[in-house]
Image (spheres, rainbow, N blue to C red):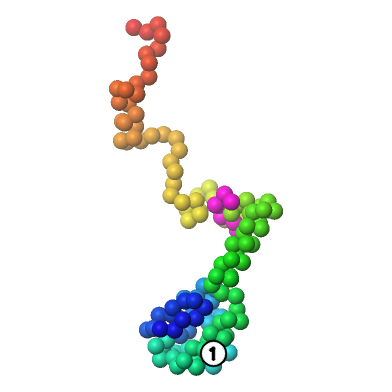
Amino acid sequence: MARLAGVELPRDKRIDVALNYIYGIGPTLSRRILESSQVRGERRVRDLSEDEVHRLAAAVSQYRVEGDLRREVTANIKRLIEIGSYRGTRHQKNLPVRGQRTRTNARTRKGPRKTVGILRGKARSDSRTPGNRPAPAAGGK
């Protein structure tokens, strides 16, 4: 199994697809890396020679990938929060950053719905147990 940028590439995949397993490498950059290292994209990872793996490793090392890229992205977000920009506050509140609507949708960032207001069904009947009854009004029968 080939190991590039600290990531084990799956043996049975084509190398052009397997490179996408590295954080920061997509289809376009994968093709560019393969062209610069002179490796055909149709080859399977298990069929690569040691020389080809070394050439790929050298080509990948020219780009910011995996841990370095993750650190940079985290530092950028931290900087936005520290300077108090709008984008920083959106990151801080865990809301969409790029202008999407939040009145409806945005469930990926906001998480599951938290119902506010009326209690329905079982939750309502639980609140009416004898121990939870309000005191009778003064002056009543």
Tell me the SS state at disc 1.
Answer: helix
The answer to whether residue 123 is above or below residue 73 is above
Residue 84 image offset from top left, x and y in percent: 68, 51
Quarter-wise, where is residue 10 in the image?
Answer: bottom left
Image quarter (top left, top right, bottom left or bottom right) of the N terminus: bottom left
Q: Dot 1: within a 10 Å radius of its alpha carbon, few (fewer than 14), some, or many (20 or more) residues?
A: some
Total numbered labels placed on residues in the image: 1
Reading the image, the residue beneath label 1 is 55
Residue at (54% x, 52% y) in the render: 94
Region rendered in magenta: 92-98
Q: Residue furthest right?
A: 83
Q: Nearer the viewer, residue 129 or 22?
A: 22
The answer to whether residue 125 is above or below residue 3 is above
Quarter-wise, where is residue 67 in the image?
Answer: bottom right
Residue 87 image offset from top left, x and y in percent: 64, 55
Residue at (40% x, 91% y) in the render: 47
> Which amino acid, by three-letter code, is at mark 1?
Arg
Residue at (58% x, 71% y) in the render: 68
